[in-house]
Image: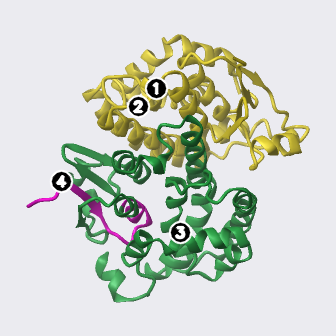
Chain colours: A green, B yellow
Amino acid sequence: MAKQVKLYGWAFSPFVSRALLCLEEAGVEYELIPMSRKAGDHRRPEHLARNPFGQVPVLEDGDLTLFESRAIGRHVLRKHKPELLGEGNLEQAAMVDVWLEVEAHQHHPVAFAIVVECVFAPLLGRARNQAAVDENVAKLKKVLEVYEARLSQSKYLAGDSISLADLSHFTVMHYFMATEYAAVVEALPHVKAWWEELAARPAARKVAAFMPLGFGPSMEEQQ
Amino acid sequence: MAPMTLYGATLSWNVTRCVAALEEAGAEYEIVPINFGTGEHKSPEHLARNPFGQVPALQDGDLYLFESRAICKYACRKNKPELLKVGDLKESAMVDVWLEVEANQYTSALNPILFECLIRPILGGTTDQKVVEENLEKLKKVLEVYEARLTKCKYLAGDFISLADLNHVSVTLCLFATPHASVFDAYPHVKAWWAGLMARPSVQKVAALMKPSA
């Protein structure tokens, strides 16, 4: 029987796996429909009909088609685990929104730039741009100082309960922590503890298996 | 009940993004400017409101919020949750999609254009036309998608106005203060959608607050 929930994309994308993490946390039955980045599946008309921006992931939930990984995450959690969004409590929901924006606009651009250069560039056969890495590592240190201060005062980013704001960091950080710059996180005791706890979650471990860190044929094949 | 305080200068399109939402939501608020020239954004008082030392920040009683889009959501949740379609799974999901699109597709292409055309001259530099051209091309591709979308529905998330539409207001007003506003001309449904937004009292209020020219 076809599953009601389908997620389209290549799982080694931290965007696709952000959505996968939310599906796993929510305990939803879903089907991952693999696509090939190498073959340009995302530019085909059938995919553009689902996401006119030609990107992954895309979620189909019954007759609802969604794109943008954080929007997909919100929908899945709103439907199945609204407490992870702080729903029903104005202040909690506001804090989740704040730290989700922080993830998207303060953390993501710098951490992802480092991941692109250090993890993806070698796979795509191009040289790492060390200047870009150095610039972003310096920025990331400043951002994580704020996280360290925050996590010294509250167990999770949005407060005392885990939320989408924390979960949304997992997939990019999974790749980041495999680079030599993991030391930046390790130097900050509260950020380190927060990261380790996040990575130990069963849902995170399951999704980590989709994001291979080994360099070699397996990732190329997935492409 | 005390009004909310929005901290930041109205020159910033991140600050005025919040004004559009606060106005449309009918919130009681006041704006307190933060002086970047004197380094006020890095003062201990302001860092207590926004640890990244940026604007905007919002104070509502004991609650301090930052990041403009989080502030906008809060204003809607508190005063006009229908702008987020709270309570309707499908419609709120569509609002979330187009809220992400505004940030990740539209404004990410528009920001560098606005920075080069409006901010660079204030800082005593010259506009980098290459950056402007590259991002105009990206913006056009985004506008093609918007044109197709707005041919099918009146607003971005559906046939209802939502925060997804309103979050476009401040940056689009800024676009119209640059020499590149004509980029909209090729997209009649986008133009009509924008004209509709411009007619709203909330948007008129934002337009009046922003500086008239670069």
- Amino acid type at circle 2 is Val
- Span highlighted in magenta in the image: A1-19
Q: Residue A15 in magenta?
A: yes
Report, in whole angstroms, how far the alpha carbon at label 1 lies from the one at label 4: 29 Å
The label shown at residue B86 is: 2
How packed is label 3: few (under 14 Cα within 10 Å), some, or many (20 or more)? some
- Looking at the rendered structure, the secondary structure element under dot 2 is loop
- Amino acid type at circle 1 is Pro
The label shown at residue B81 is: 1
Report, in whole angstroms, how far the alpha carbon at label 2 lies from the one at label 3: 29 Å
Both labels 1 and 4 in a single chain? no
Q: Residue extending furthest left?
A: A1
- Amino acid type at circle 4 is Gln
* Residue carrying label 3: A198
Q: Earlier in the sequence, mark 4 or mark 3?
A: 4
Q: Residue at x 45, y 32 (%)?
A: B164
- Amino acid type at circle 3 is Leu
Image location of residue B209, percent across then percent down:
69, 18
Image location of residue A193, percent across then percent down:
64, 72
